[in-house]
Image (spheres, helix red, strand yellow):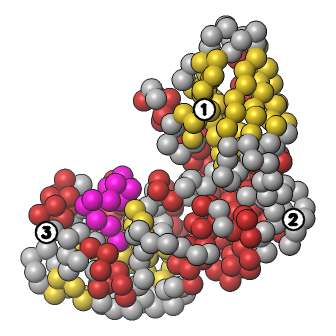
Amino acid sequence: MHLKAFYFMKKYLLFITLLPIGLFAQVQQKTQKSKKNQQSAPVTSDAYTITGEMTGYADGTVVDLMNASSGMPEATTTISNGKFVLNGKQEYPDLKLIAFNKTAPYISIFLENARVNVKASKDALDKAVITGSASHDDFVAYTNLAKPYEKIFNGEMQADEATVKKVAASMENFARQRPNSHISLIAIFRNHQLTSNAEQMEELFKNLNPDVRLSPMGNYIAQQIDEAKRNPIGKPLADFVQADTSGNAFSLSSLKGKYVLVDFWASWCGPCRQENPNVVSAYQKYKDKNFTVLGVSLDKAKQPWIDAIKADNLTWPHVSDLKGWQNAVALQFQISSIPQNFLIDPNGIVIGKNLRGAALESKLASLIK
């Protein structure tokens, strides 16, 4: 995929979809286990057919159905007499992009095994009319509901309490009204993002159809529920001691009196390295205002760990026992994916979890004046 097109897609998807876990975290390899009838139902057909009617494109224009996470094509055809047909099979409803001649802009479609029709014009792909997919209908309804609050979800804006309650309630209602919809998983995630209410997230999740809960996105939400119930917000984070880069014992409690981001990462973790510039930015902005970071590495070898610290300019304290996923602190807090973090206040109380990008700086801005 053309690099410019890739970055357009990444930015476009950041708001409208809950991306698969691989884009956010390096996950420890393990098997994860995990009321009918309103709105979209689980997939019942065994294949999909997308029939497109397009204006403005020449015959022979390449049409790709792309995986929205990887940008890789999953089905390809060409336009003939203003029409195209794409066929395939979905294991579960998922977000796809329809690309023409492998360039942006794209048509987004939440695709299930069904007969789907697409009508659009080259100069107005954002106004494409898509029918036949109940999951896509729910996706459009969710997008229209959530779009006014994009900056809140992305951590770019602090909302007042009344607005947060209003938006959280709208996400809750969406999920309750659509127990058979895969889009409800996104709404549940957004609700928890605003409320940090693990009990409600679990209750809403259990209300969903089993086929929805057992989807890959459902497995992701199940993991988020498990993590939210561990080391919960409002409770103290247990102390720990581990060797720093010089081999000396370093304790979390030695930082008491500061806001501390306890950051689990590793040199080999791609998503962690991608997130590091955001952590560096927050650290540089608030390091002189009673804030610091404590890195806990899940590396197995010392030199790559040290090299990554230097390369990424991570100038805060770091600890590791160089045991990978068996790191004693990671086991203590049941860490099964990275990057992962806890923000604690000067008394050691957890006040935030898994704050990334703009969300971390926004949270710190609300705490540190």
Instruction: Say few, some or many: other residues with alpha carbon within 10 Å of mark 3 (under 14 / 14 to 19 / 20 or more).
Output: some
Give the x, y percent position of residue 179. Answer: 82, 66
Q: Is residue 345 visible from the viewing direction of this image? A: no
Q: Of marks 3 and 1, which one's residue comes earlier in the chain?
A: 1
Name the residue type under label 3: Lys
**SS of the residue at dot 2?**
helix
Name the residue type under label 1: Ala
Residue at 32 percent across and 67 percent down: it is 265
Q: Nearer the viewer, residue 315 or 198?
A: 198
Tell me: residue 152, above or below residue 117. below
Q: Which residue is mark 3?
A: 302
Name the side, left or right, on which 90 lies relative to 293: right
**SS of the residue at dot 1?**
strand
Classify residue 35 by image quadrant. bottom right
Q: Which residue is mark 1?
A: 75
The single residue placed furthest to the left in the displayed view is 246
Q: Which residue is mark 2?
A: 177
Name the residue type under label 2: Gln
Q: Nearer the viewer, residue 156 or 204?
A: 204
